[in-house]
Image (cartoon, rainbow, N blue to C red):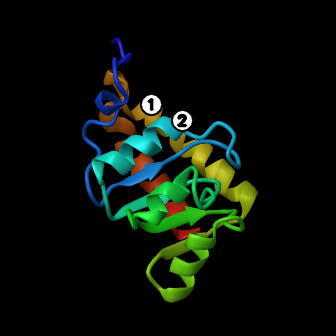
Amino acid sequence: MNKVVDHISDALKGIEDGMTIMLGGFGLCGIPENSIKELVKMGTKNLTCISNNAGVDDYGLGLLLQRKQIKKMISSYVGENEEFERQMLSGELEVDLIPQFPGLYSQEAAANLFYWQNTQSSYHSTLQLTRACFAALVST
């Protein structure tokens, strides 16, 4: 199966309002900046974002926060984004802060299970386990 796409919008087809998405990177290194910019263009809203951090005011997830496209943030480091702080303190943004390493392990487990879930031979066998892993991450 070829998963190469010609444009970032093709890669994000199926992302809808209210979805939970997990974004990679550590700090601002390795973040999916083109995907974030495309989500801004798409206007997708009420997102729950799982990420190591909340970006900064004008970069990374900060772009989605400025446009109030994120409903809930699940993260371990949020200290460099004034808009995040403002939304959190005003109650506009739901926030789950998770410790760095337990969150990292939960994300790694979820990513591995997501891969297994999407292979034809294991689709049904790990679907419930994947959901349980994400539920554990959210409740951490």
Q: Using residue 100 as the reference point, say whether residue 2 is left or right of it.
A: left
Q: Amino acid at mark 1?
A: Trp
- Tally the marks: 2
Q: Residue furthest top?
A: 2
Could you say whether the residue bearing mark 1 is in a helix, strand or loop?
helix
Q: Using residue 4 as the reference point, say whether residue 63 is left or right of it.
A: right
Question: Circles 1 and 2: CB distance less than 8 Å?
Answer: yes
Distance, label 1 to label 2, CA atoms, is 6 Å
Q: Which numbered marker is on residue 116?
A: 1
Q: Is residue 47 above or below residue 87?
A: above
Residue 117 point in image, percent of width and height: 39, 34
Residue at x 34% of width, y 17% of height:
6
Residue 121 point in image, percent of width and height: 34, 22
Pointer 2 residue? 112
**Observer able to see residue 1:** yes
Residue 9 point in image, percent of width and height: 31, 32
Image quarter of the N terminus: top left
Q: Amino acid at mark 2?
A: Asn
Q: Using residue 4 as the reference point, say whether residue 49 is left or right of it.
A: right
Residue at x 38% of width, y 41% of height:
38
Pointer 1 local density, CA inside 10 Å: few below 14, some 14–19, many at least 20: some
Residue 68 point in image, percent of width and height: 40, 67
